[in-house]
Each structure stands twice: as C-alpha cells, then as structure tokens.
Image (spheres, rainbow, N blue to C red):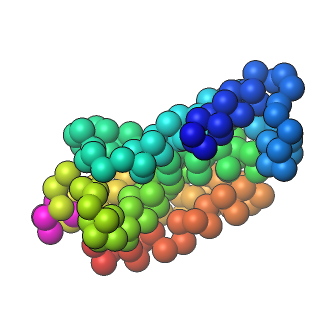
Amino acid sequence: MRLQWWRDAIVEIGQGGPVRKHEVTVPLQDVVDAQAAHRLDQLIAARRWDLYTDPFEDIGHFKEYLDRTGGALMWEAARALGATEDAKNTVWRYGFASALARFLMAASELEKRGRIPLLDGTAAGIVARAENAWELMPNQRELRAKVPRPAWPALLEGWQTRGILKRA
C-alpha cells in the first residue's frame, strides 16, 4: 500500500500538476522532472520484489531489478546534480555494480528470512555475477573524466563496491 502511495505521488510529480501535500513530495517536485519521475516509478515497481518471497524469474529479471534500483537511481541523482547525457552510461554502470555489491551483502540475511535472493547461489554463481559487475563497472579515471564534480556526491553510495565485489 505504501509503495502504491509513492507510485501515485511520483506520477503526480511527473505530470507537473498539483501534488499531494507531504513533507517529501512538495520539495521533491522542485527537483524531479518527468524523466526522473518515470525512472523513480520503475524503481518503486521493482522494489515490489522485496515484499514477496518469490525468487527472481530469471537472470534478466534480476538484472532489471539491479538496473532499476541501482543504475537508474544513481543516474537520476547524478543528473539532478548536473551530470549530462555524456556521463549517463558511466554512472548507470557504476550504480548497477553498486546495487549488486549491496545485494550480495544482503543475500545471507535474505536467505535467513526464507527468501531465494540469487538464482545461482553457488560459489561459482556468485563469482560469475561479481565478475560481470566488475567488468562493467567504470574505473575511477573514467568516473572523474565523465562525471562533473558537482555530481560526485551521487556516486558516494558506491565507495565500497570494488572491495565488496573483490571479496565476492
């Protein structure tokens, strides 16, 4: 119910009309345009997976979840801070890798709660996912070259990503 409330609020913001009065929605409408609202709506929809015990349907579903909850979120944060389309792919890949790293850290707790977080939770499966994210993830030189300094705070969530993926 709460996720649906937020989806409705984000749609209102994206349409540019009046939004429901809330301590978050009112200031949010000043920084979220229609494009960001669409991506935030997709993020909220992806988070529905968090509510249920069903596993991901397939690897595509898992990647879509990471893409929408990590890649898109980091990109929209960077864009709000001044990143241009030139940085989009770089930031998006970094957000995706960061989302995977955090998800791997949460996997054992999710399993304890009766979830099936990974399609292939074997050591080989985890290594494959981590290696894939490692290869996609931009290095610091690329991040500095593509992302304008005012947008760097959007990347802070990923500061531990390399270490987490390396341990995995």
Is residue 129 placed above or below 67 in the rendered structure? below
Q: Is 63 one of the magenta-colored residues? A: no
Q: As drawn, is 24 to the left or to the right of 168?
A: right
Image position, residue 84 (x, y; %): 69, 41
Residue shown at 27%/45% (left/top)? 54
Does residue 155 appear anywhere in the picture? yes
Residue shown at 46%/61% (left/top)? 98
Does residue 90 appear anywhere in the picture? no
Image position, residue 71 (x, y; %): 50, 47
Image position, residue 10 (x, y; %): 69, 33
Is residue 99 placed above or below 109 in the rendered structure? above
Q: Quadrant of residue 167?
A: bottom left
> Toward the viewer: 140 or 95?
95
> Toward the viewer: 87 or 22?
22
Residue shown at 26%/65% (left/top)? 111
Residue shown at 76%/37% (left/top)? 32
Is residue 53 placed above or below 140 in the rendered structure? above
Q: As drawn, is 19 to the left or to the right of 91?
A: right
Majority secondary structure in the magenta region? helix
Q: Is 125 one of the magenta-colored residues? A: yes
Quarter of the C terminus within the rendering: bottom left
Residue numbers of the magenta segment: 122-126
Quarter of the N terminus within the rendering: top right
Q: As drawn, is 125 to the left or to the right of 62?
A: left
What residue occupies the far front of the structure in this picture? 1
> Toward the viewer: 84 or 163?
163
Q: Quadrant of residue 120?
A: bottom left
Image position, residue 67 (x, y; %): 44, 44
Q: Quadrant of residue 65?
A: top left
